[in-house]
Image (cartoon, rainbow, N blue to C red):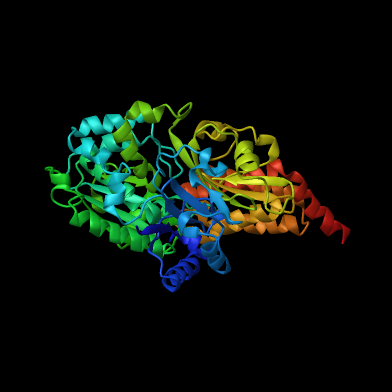
Amino acid sequence: MTVTIYIPCDSGALALGAGKVATAVSQEIAARGLDAKIVRNGSRGAYFLEPMVEIETASGRVAYGPVSVKDVPSLFDAGLISGGQHRLSLGNPAEIPFFARQTRLTFARCGITDPLSLDDYKAHGGLKGLQKAVASAPAEIVKTVTDSGLRGRGGAGFPTGIKWKTVMEAVSDRKYILCNADEGDSGTFADRMIMEGDPFVLIEGMTIAGIATGATKGFVYIRSEYPHAVATMTHAVEIARRNGVLGVSVLGSPNAFDIEIRTGAGAYVCGEETSLMNSLEGKRGVVRAKPPLPAIQGLFGKPTVINNVISLASVPVIMDRGAEFYKDFGIGRSRGTIPIQIAGNVKHGGLFEAAFGLTLGEIVDDIGGGTATGRPVKAVQVGGPLGAYFPRKLFDTPFDYEAFAAKDGLVGHAGIVVFDDTADMLKQARFAMEFCAIESCGKCTPCRIGSTRGVETLDRIAAGIEPEKQLALVTDLCNTMKFGSLCALGGFTPYPVMSSINHFPDDFRQAAVAVAAE
């Protein structure tokens, strides 16, 4: 009987050497004349254990990791094919503490199935949501998504059902579903993991959205820095089309829906929905004024649903299991699960899917294991480069949209970047302003000019030039950017800047003192 060996082809795992390990395993199989095959799956998301090699045995899967090329011969000597004991043995991957604590709904198949096997996808519950959707009225689908409490997982947290209902009710000869896969936030990789590890769930979610709203065409806009995601999604769309999941008759129904993969050039501002639409239309990626809203007049002037990858990938399980099942997870107005991406100076970095409600301290200290350096945690930035820096005194904050907003923070795309006590928060504040200045589309003055002036002002603080006056000036600049910018790039840049000033004032005072001492 042919033994199946799983080795991830996920970009994160490849960066850690999974490709070389797969080659070494393949060579070892050939040299030993073994009856085994390699399946390149997605990563389960525990990057501190990657490359992780899994063997399908009679009693279930057995994992080993992190595996390097030099470990491969000894693994085979120890009986890798039958799940033999080795110093890298991890046992049943589902029982590894990092995975055992998770509630995997959106990422239920990531790391388990062959990403490009539709049969494997269906064998693990795939297409059940779409099958229910083709047998339902559009209004029923929209109601299910609305009742589930699903909100935009791309950062804004806007109720998904409201967007869908608006597009469903819009009268037009053409409507679109646009998937925003321009994942540009530092410390985030959930979108990429889905596209590389379980692409059919995104295709299924987009198709359900199309049926619900009357849209017949979808686009996935992927940033150019994700070549593996582009290749996997392109291949998956072709497979779905050949098997009747996409096309003029979705699963044999009267509904038509097709998807096209588009690649962006890597501008951070194209993660903003109107800038993304301009880019997709072949125009310069600049922000559009709203109204009109994209749901009324979006891509090519037609009603458009724009959702993030995780929002759309969460829809199939909602349609399959029902709104109440999904809504039962979470707290307050934050329902369902959220894929938390733990990165930075942290011991156990990776993707952790759980119901809303874990505290920031639980995520960083318990799940993440504290810093990789072993030094004390100084700050945690949540929500990407435009997210606020939270000090340890705020670690009791539950992971919830409203709870973070109440403390001048953002859940955003749920990326968490950990910093130890060597971090200089004045430099981090300057980086935020510089990032905004570089990535600004230039359309509005508060963002374009405010960020440039912000860099100059923070540099004066670092140089010890009238620090109190400069702090007052940067605070005023942040207020103007927050309330005067056309989009969230300029509007959210004040979050990392002001949180640095408010929570870590010593870093700003010490710079002035150090200069004065010289």
Name which residue lies at 34% across and 63% down.
231
Q: Position of residue 409 (x, y in %)?
A: 57, 39
Q: Nearer the viewer, residue 451 or 413?
A: 413
Q: Residue furthest right?
A: 517
Residue 3 sits in which quadrant? bottom left
Q: Nearer the viewer, residue 321 or 506?
A: 321
478 sits to left or right of 297: right
91 sits to left or right of 474: left
Q: Position of residue 264 (x, y in %)?
A: 37, 62
The quadrant of the picture occupied by the C terminus is bottom right
407 sits to left or right of 249: right
Name which residue lies at 29% across and 35% down.
319
* Residue 311 visible in the shown view: yes
Q: Nearer the viewer, residue 12 or 171?
A: 12
* Residue 285 visible in the shown view: no
Name which residue lies at 56% across and 35% down.
404
Q: Position of residue 238 (x, y in %)?
A: 24, 59
Residue 517 sits in which quadrant? bottom right
Q: How many marks?
A: 0
113 sits to left or right of 375: left
Residue 168 sits in which quadrant? top left
The quadrant of the picture occupied by the N terminus is bottom left
Q: Position of residue 106 (x, y in %)?
A: 40, 42
